[in-house]
Image: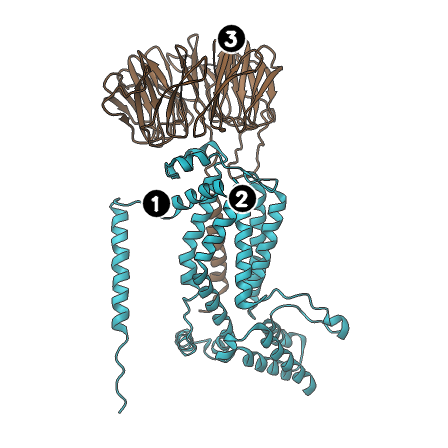
Amino acid sequence: MAEAKPKPVSGFNVRRLIIFLLIAVVLFLLITGVISITGVWDTILLNPMVNFLVLMSKYFLGSFGIAIIVLTIIIRLLMFPLTMRQLQSSKAMQALQPKMKELQKKYGKDQQKLNQEVMKLYKEEGVNPLGCALPMLIQFPIWIALYQSVIQALAYTPENLLGLSKQLYHSSIIQQALPLNHYFLGLDLTSGNIFMAILTAVSMWVLQKMSTQPSADPQAQSMNRIMLWAMPLVFGFFSLTLPSGLSLYWVVSNVISIVMQYRVTGWGTLQKPSFAFLRRGTPQPAGNPQAKIEGAASTGKKEGKSDALQQKGAEASGAISGSKEAAGSDIDSQRKKVRHGKRRSKRKN
Amino acid sequence: MFDTRRTRLTKVLIVAAILVALVLSGCAGKRGWPGTISEGGVLYASTMDGRVVALNPDSGSRRWDWEPSAGQSGQTASSFTCAGSSLVGGLFYSAPAFADDMVFVAFHSGTVYAINADNGNQLWVYDLRSSVSGGPAAGNGTVFVGAANGKLTALDAGNGTFEWEFSTKNEIWATPAVVDGVVYFGSLDHNLYAVNAVDGTENWAFKTDGEIASIPLIVDGVVYIGSFDNRFYAVDANTGKQKWVFEGAGNWFWSQAVYDNGIVYAGCLDHNVYALYAGNGTPAWPKPFKADDQVKSSPVIAGGVLVVASEDDGKIYGVDLKTGKQKWEFDNIGTKVLSPLCAAGGTVYINSQDNKLYALNAQTGIQVWAVPLSK
């Protein structure tokens, strides 16, 4: 008779209990007014960043622009392990999509069973569904603080300068660093700028394109398209109207994110334009190979293509990301498999 | 697990809302801090909505109301910016100045106006083409205004024509003071300047370790001014040499000091008001008066009481001049008070950020009247 496995939940519960108690204590202190959210926020995050920015602008050629770049790089380096974990989790989740789709087809009508099977799949594949969200949640306050510190330190209005008086440490080195030099490479960092707006929008579009997870779901595709264009446009607009110091922070941050995204997932759905169709005379849509296959499978019926093609396409798709190896393999090898699957389908036909 | 269209849309909307909140969270929007002066039995108040109002000091009733015609102030009417304003008239960061039956105001957008003090008719307008974060000073038949281009500009008070300009090494955010043919003003380049009011030549410059945004106080040949280096200075008005310095503060000095009977009272952003002997800068009170928040508004003396405003909570305090003890407190304003206070005949007048003018009895702290300054 198989020995009953010890319940692994006891340690987990203790951890949960500690987290619960910590949250309860913090909530109690906040509700009773012993600590204030803004006070804690300012003391732990905002004030150190603002003072660091001011201090660095004194020592980096007196340039606030260089100070913004340096602080953004430092913060992103400190967050590197978290960001990488988030990207790796995101990649692993992406690789599970075909299996998820199969499960959805199989158990689509029974939501409870579907959830159970999905959780089972996560367990089997060693994927934590919160793996993307948790690092992002931890990083989010730091990004906000970095953003706020840039706008506070710029102090381009009398109200901002008055606010800065509450953030600065009162050391003579800091006081002497003011006022900050608002000009960087000929740009006035206190006013909006078309050049920085374009840079912000383009870098955000590239990042968005690289990090968009391909999906066969037309609704999801539609949302992805909206986000792909809405985010760069909104931030481009903000860059036109808000101080360029913020745009500088966004551009530097985006470039770092692009580099990290490239290291983990490659160019993602941002492919070099393929001119192969010019040589072959057949259309070759750009984008993630998985998306191509799934796209072919989903649109095949509408266009009256053969079921065999759809089946082979689906097989190839499954071959790409159905295994654990696929989760770790790079995009290029996936693309080769997809092309191979396609050719086989064509030959058969 | 598998998102429906509605949940996806909700997610997108949440992300968009977070982004907009994030972008706007850092925006401390410009609102200005207009002020009030009392001249010849009339109150002249600049307002939060970009106008100038003349009022009777006993009741707060209006004599006249002035606003620039659309587009003249140089303020864009409906642009979206982090610190955007939809005002036609723009913003004020100071009280008006008065000389020769004329009221002078400078908008943050850089336009300077002269208004007839009797009827509120506009006399002339001059565009400095640089933002003004202080205000004008008038004397010697000239109006002096400092701007973000680092220049102090002198304009003929009668017709608004350009007379001369004096350049500093950084922006000027302070309102100048004119005494005996000399203009005294601070600059963000850390210097206090004394400039000849007639031709704009420099008499002297006194260097501090921080930016200067407060209005100098000149009494008996001594200039009293605080700096963003947390110090308060007494400087010889003729030579520019330091007489003494007070180093016991914990934050910047932004407001103008006030003088009475050999003591200088200086409000500080560390929440304190310091009473210092004018002769040597030593504290005149056992301990400074502590307000609940930063003291950004210039304190005034009225009815033998020092009246102080604290910034965030808008509390007004009556403080004993000799002991530094609180005599009364008025906390019915309920909004920020950043504007310099104004005193006349035992009454103190307070421009609040809700665009109202309050009149308080300086000895008791009881409200005499309060009127909205909006149209």
**Could you tell me which chain the residue with mark 1 belongs to?**
A
Q: Nearer the viewer, residue B93 or B219?
A: B219
Residue tagged 3:
B101
**Chain A colour?**
cyan
Q: Is residue A231 visible?
A: yes
**Amino acid type of the residue tagged 1 in the rendering:** Thr
- Dot 2 surroundings within 10 Å: few (below 14), some, or many (20 or more)? many
Q: Which residue is mark 1?
A: A43
Q: Is residue A94 left or right of residue B306?
A: right
Q: Are marks 2 and 1 on the same chain?
A: yes
The image quadrant where one finds the N terminus of chain B is bottom left
Q: Position of residue A172 (x, y in %)?
A: 39, 35
| Residue holding disc 2 | A65
Q: Is residue B141 above or below residue A59?
A: above
Q: Amino acid at mark 3?
A: Asp
On the question of residue B21 being in view, the answer is no
> Chain B rendered in what hue?
brown
**Front label number (3 vs 1):** 1
| SS at circle 3 | loop
> Which sits in the foreground, A85 or B58?
A85
